[in-house]
Image (cartoon, rainbow, N blue to C red):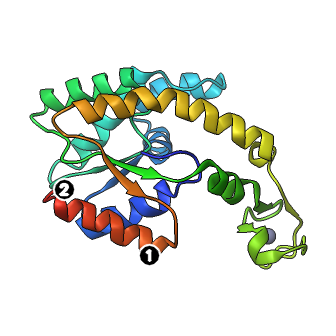
């Protein structure tokens, strides 16, 4: 787990590759279920077309479908789920029904100042969706790939980012306490620094937990 901009997606993909297990990211599972029109995909579609977030039981259903598909994978990595205590409770029930359990819960710790800098500095190409950062492009507003216009998404504006982070902290504080009290424990990992440095710390944390 980790706040928006902490690098969950990037690190999750790398960890999953290293562990040789599938990475189950909520967004990917939704796209897959919609594309394959699975039973849960059909349920997701109703919320999706209404512009609503899928409720917890539907997301848990998606995870169950993904785990069924990956039954022989020898494990899995959840990226960005659960986000609330209610979701964590639902996940615990789902896993116990399947005789599975979590081996580790990793929390990427990044300061709000760094997150605001990472997100509010993001620039996205209007034409090809190329994502870059003002640190790389400076004041140049032209996409290096297609010469389209680089813009800041409204979601990435500083005030919006601060608000998103405040909402995140409020919701995940109880979740962190939940896992800290649980048998699995909560392992905080320093999420500041380069992608490689952070990956090394995550792998070291897994080695300490004897997950490999
Ligand atoms: Zn472009």
In the figure, 163 relative to 113: above or below? above
Asked whether residue 39 appears in the rendered view, the answer is no
Task: Name which residue lies at 59% across and 29% down.
Answer: 48
- Percent of width and height locating residue 140: 90, 75
- Percent of width and height locating residue 156: 75, 48
Task: Name the secondary structure under disc 2.
Answer: loop
Horizontal relation, residue 177 to residue 183: left or right: right
Asked whether residue 149 appears in the rendered view, the answer is yes
Quadrant of the image occupied by residue 66: top left
Q: Which is nearer the eye, 76 or 45? A: 76
The mark lying in front, picked from 1 and 2, is 1
Check the picture and name the quadrant holding the C terminus: bottom left
In the figure, 117 relative to 4: above or below? below
Quadrant of the image occupied by residue 56: top left
In the figure, 121 relative to 68: above or below? below
- Image quarter for ligand 1 equals bottom right
Q: Which residue is mark 1?
A: 196
Tag 1 and tag 2, C-beta contact below 8 Å = no
Horizontal relation, residue 128 to residue 93: left or right: right
Characterize the local packing of mark 1: few (<14), some (14-19) or many (20 or more) Cα atoms within 10 angstroms.
few
Task: Name which residue lies at 47% across and 46% down.
Answer: 2
- Percent of width and height locating residue 34: 49, 38
Characterize the local packing of mark 2: few (<14), some (14-19) or many (20 or more) Cα atoms within 10 angstroms.
few
């Amino acid at each position: 787990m980790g706040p928006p901009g902490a690098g969950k997606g990037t690190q999750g993909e790398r960890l999953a590759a290293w562990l040789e297990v599938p990475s189950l990211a909520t967004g990917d599972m939704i796209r897959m279920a919609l594309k394959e029109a699975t039973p849960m995909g059909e349920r997701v579609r109703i919320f999706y077309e209404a512009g609503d977030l899928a409720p917890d039981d539907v997301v848990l259903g998606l995870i169950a479908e993904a785990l069924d598909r990956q039954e022989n994978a020898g494990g899995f990595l959840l990226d960005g789920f659960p986000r609330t205590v209610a979701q964590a409770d639902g996940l615990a029930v789902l896993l116990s029904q399947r005789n599975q359990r979590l081996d580790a819960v990793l929390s990427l710790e990044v300061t709000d100042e760094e997150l605001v800098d990472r997100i509010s500095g993001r620039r996205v190409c209007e034409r090809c969706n190329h994502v870059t950062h003002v640190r790389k492009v400076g004041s140049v507003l032209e996409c290096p790939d297609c010469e389209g216009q680089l813009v800041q998404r409204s979601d990435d504006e500083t005030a919006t980012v601060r608000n998103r982070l405040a909402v995140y902290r409020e919701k995940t504080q109880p979740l962190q306490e939940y896992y800290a009290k649980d048998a699995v424990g909560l392992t905080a990992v320093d999420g500041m620094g380069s992608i490689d440095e952070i990956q090394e710390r995550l792998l070291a944390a897994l080695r300490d937990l004897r997950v490999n």
